[in-house]
Image: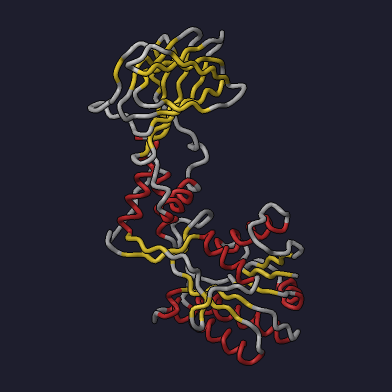
Amino acid sequence: MKILITGAKGFIGKNLVSHLRNIQEGKDKTYTLDPNFEILECDIDTDAAILEQYSQEADFIYNLAGINRPEKESEFMEGNYDFASDLLDLLQKYQNTCPIMLSSSAQASLDNPYGRSKKAGEDLLFQYANKTGAKVMVYRFPNVFGKWCRPNYNSAIATFCNNIANDLDISISDRNYKMTLIYIDDLVKELIFALQGKENREGNFCAVPIVHHKTLGEIADLLYSFKDSRNDLSVANMNDPFAKKLYSTYLSYLPCDKFSYLLKMNVDPRGSFTEMLKSKDRGQVSVNISKPGIVKGNHWHHSKNEKFLVVSGKGVIRFRKIDEEKVYEYFVSGDQLEVVDIPVGYTHNIENLAATDMVTVMWVNEPFDPEFPDTFYLEV
């Protein structure tokens, strides 16, 4: 099978090609798609003779080519109608009635130059289908967001992500303006389903089934919270599908020299204790480093509970129920990763038994609250 993708270097095209390449190379097995296919990439710089050859050979066409920010208004029709017309003429020349997917826009229902050009492209494709019997799939995409989207062009989210990640201001005229959004990976998944004949149809059109509705204010607040998370160590609510997708998008706009950030290490002669992540509903993760022979802990909790994981070095974790004398010992080592639960009502400590530093990853079910620490000193 030969798959022609026009606009292959654009935002949607680039993501689609990368997904198809993973399937083709056997790296992505989430789709029941035969990997024995060829991708024919076409973009604005593709020679006309190459496009003609591809039009003759193609078994499926993704027409993602289009114009949305031209220098002249006339270029709307040139990019969104004339190109589609030329492509269909080539298909008819070679009597190629393969299925065609068209990337249109939600603005096709609006009376503006861009919307009119998109509507004209849609009508042209529907007329072609009626004339030739070819299967056509027209998608009216709303705002699309995700990695590789060009900032300061036609995507508010791409611009917001880029500016906030790079310490630049953003401009919002109406925080309550609600956007209809689809995530690039959801879009690509639907396009691959369409390739398999499993497109999601809604009347005469096709649509990505997963849609998000968010105000500009909500989007901006989330993005600023992602930026602040490096200081307050907070983690976004990954149970919220939109927040999860937006966070992935935001990270893709980080400057290449700012992927890392320092943490505050609380250092004393015993070693160090460093908080890494905090979540109101998932607790806190920290890294504890103990010097040789050092004992840390000797306290207990009413409700707070923890998990210890020694990832380097050797040690022992001791427990004693607060009203008993018997001590329980768990010997731990970075050579065999083993999580130890710290139950409530047991005083506990951890001792480094090696001649080198011992590193322990610690999780606690709630972020530390200095007003209600729920931590009481008691020797094991």
Quarter of the image for residue 134 reads bottom right
- Quadrant where the image shows the N terminus: bottom right
Classify residue 206 as left or right of residue 264: right
Q: Position of residue 287 (x, y in %)?
A: 45, 25
On the image, the x and y values in percent for residue 32 come to 67, 63
The residue at 42%/80% (across/down) is 109
Q: Residue furthest left?
A: 371
Q: For the point 61% across and 83% down, which residue is it?
A: 85
Residue that appears at 54% across and 19% down: 332
Q: Nearer the viewer, residue 40 or 186?
A: 186
In the rendered image, the residue lying farthest to the bottom is 131
- What coloring was used for the rendering? secondary structure
Residue 255 in view (yes/no): yes
Query: Is residue 62 found left or right of 359 in the rendered image?
Result: right
Q: Nearer the viewer, residue 334 or 120?
A: 334
Residue closer to the observer: 276 or 308: 308
Asked if 374 appears above or below 353 in the picture, the reply is below
Residue 231 at least partly seen: no
Residue under the point 30% across and 57% down:
172
The quarter holding residue 33 reads bottom right
Q: Is residue 338 above or below residue 52?
A: above
Q: Nearer the viewer, residue 220 or 304?
A: 304
The x, y position of residue 335, in whole percent, is 62, 21
Image quarter hosting the C terminus: top left
Q: In the picture shown, does residue 335 fall above or below 1?
A: above
- The image shows a total of numbered marks equal to 0
Residue 310 percent coordinates (x, y): 52, 22
Compared with 296, 372 (above or below) is: below
